[in-house]
Structures are given as C-alpha cells and as structure tokens.
Image (cartoon, rainbow, N blue to C red):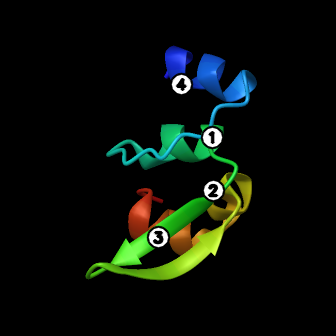
Amino acid sequence: FDIIQQLREEGMTIFLVEQNANQALKLADRGYVLENGRVVLEDTGAALLANEAVRSAYLGG
C-alpha cells in the first residue's frame, strides 16, 4: 500500500480492487460497494469507513 499511496500523492488515478477493504478505503477518494455484480453504494472512502451499515456488513464490525 506504500507504493499506491506514493502514486496517489503524485496525482495518478488508480482503480484498485482489493480484498483488504479497510486499508483500501483509507487510501480511496471514492469507494464502491458491489453486491451480485451491481453497485449498491458509493461514497468517499472516509464516509464508507464511517458508515455503520457498511462496517457491519462488509468490514467485520
């Protein structure tokens, strides 16, 4: 994630698909929640991390 952070700081756009959602959302300007191949929620990474429904359903609490 250090390299991704460095590229982000350089202004590079990155499309990241990552199993570690907590870490990915900490870096993300935007995040998307998919269910059955469809986007069901989108927001900033920080807002998704703070969303209780997202935390409970997808981030382990």
Give the label, 4 or 1, closer to the camera: 4
Report how far apart the C-alphas of labels 2 and 4 lie in the structure. 19 Å
Report how far apart the C-alphas of labels 1 and 2 lie in the structure. 8 Å
The residue sitting at 72% across, 53% down in the picture is 46
Q: Secondary structure under badge 1?
A: helix
| Badge number at residue 33 | 3
How dense is the environment of label 4, judged by Cα within 10 Å: few (below 14), some, or many (20 and up)?
some
Vertical placement of 38 versus 48: above or below?
Answer: below
**Residue 12 spot, x, y in % from top left:** 64, 32
Vertical placement of 36 versus 54: above or below?
Answer: below
Q: Earlier in the sequence, mark 4 or mark 1?
A: 4
Q: Earlier in the sequence, mark 2 or mark 4?
A: 4
Report how far apart the C-alphas of labels 4 and 1 lie in the structure. 11 Å
The residue sitting at 55% across, 79% down in the picture is 41
Circles 2 and 4: CB distance less than 8 Å? no
For the residue marked with disc 3, what is the amino acid?
A: Val
Give the label, 2 or 4, closer to the camera: 4
| Badge number at residue 26 | 1
Circles 4 and 1: CB distance less than 8 Å? no
